[in-house]
Image (spheres, rainbow, N blue to C red):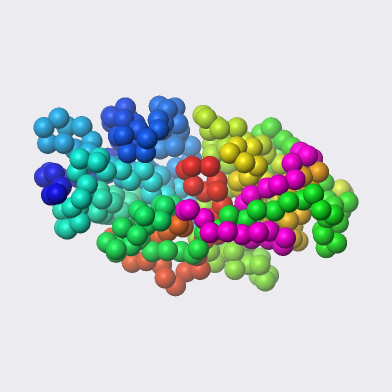
Amino acid sequence: MRGPEGAVEVGNGLEDVDALRGLFQTVFGHTISDAHWRWKYHQGPKLANAHAILRCPESGQPLAHAGAQMVAGTQAGRPIRMAQVCDIMVHPSVRGDLGPTNVYRRVTTALLRRLVELGPTQWPLFCYGFPGHRPFALGERMGLYRRLYEGVNCDSSWAEPRPAWAPVWRWRMREVSRFDDGPAQRAIGASARATQLPSAAISSSLRPAIDKTAAYLHWRYAEHPGRPYRFWLLSRPLGGPTGWLVTAAEPQPTLVDCGLDTVPGGVALGLSLLAGLTGQSAWVTWLPHEGAQCSPSAIVPTELGVATAFHRDWLPPQFQPGDTDVF
């Protein structure tokens, strides 16, 4: 089936929020609220957002869409643009054409070409997303997708005795209600500075990563319109906060995000302390750690590229669930 004629429009998508939410429900089989859509694309400390839309020639309604949100990031100590591509949607009535007029290819290509022009254009651009295996295979075949690494879910239980190398009495964890107060900002700053130090763990500084400032974390978690999160600070008894964690209870207890670069054995230690504080022994994360059972993920961490070459010479990012638009 040949895709519809007409140019792909690229803009900010504000005039099409309701229509795009309708397409979302048709394609994915569930709804997304107006507040959630606007939070994702039009709020928070973003550098830019973009939407590529292909319309029905007769009705003007969107038949296909690809969206992106761009935030500040770092790689090898320099600022970069991190653009997450999401909600690539094609109405069932215009699927099937795998040739040059393929709708999926057209909206994705138009979006990627527009992203090159947005934000501080002197910064390198890194475009990424988290498709499932079937859409990844389609995008890879079209030359638009590159697998960054094999995604995993890491399950661990902390009902067993704590590992000897992680004496919990040397650390303290407490829950806080805000991401932008003094102690939280100190923890966030300490974790960010650690990635710039010349130590063995510091391959992390060479990986593209979102600049997780207090403002970013507050928008991403405290202002999310539909999902509650809990925010934790980790510190030594006589010192200030040096690490932070974000957790969610649904659909299962999950370490959604963390900054633990200054903490030896940080992920395992953090989960161990969380188990003691919450009474929840079983946790899942995307970060491999001692004692975890890791299994393949249904999500493929992916770099997208067409207007710029793939960054094959960069170390891949180390994504966490909160880096997606789903968790």
Closer-to-camera residue (77/324): 324
Which is more toward the observer, 238 or 84? 84
Name the spot of residue 308 as percent of width and height, x first.
Answer: 32, 63
Labels in figure, total = 0
Quadrant assignment, res 318: bottom right
Snapshot quadrant of residue 303: bottom left
- Left or right of 160 in this view: 301: left
Q: Position of residue 118 (x, y in %)?
A: 34, 49
- The residue positioned 83% from the left and 63% from the top of the image is 165
Instruction: Left or right? Give the position of 271 relative to 318.
Output: right
Quarter location, residue 98:
bottom left
Q: Can residue 122 be seen from the camera position used here?
A: no
Please tell me which residue lies in front, 114 or 30.
30
Q: Is residue 25 a member of the stretch shown in magenta?
A: no
Q: Residue at x 63, y 67 (%)?
A: 202
Q: Horizontal and vertical percent for residue 41? A: 40, 37
Q: Does the stretch in magenta take in 298? A: yes
Judge from the rendering whether residue 97 lies leftward or rightward of residue 193; answer left or right: left
The residue segment tinted magenta is 277-299
Image-based side of 19 in relation to 33, left or right: left
Residue 108 appearing in the image: yes
Q: Nearer the viewer, residue 284 or 177?
A: 284
Q: Give me the residue at 68% from left, 70% from top.
A: 199
Residue at 41% x, 56% y is 133
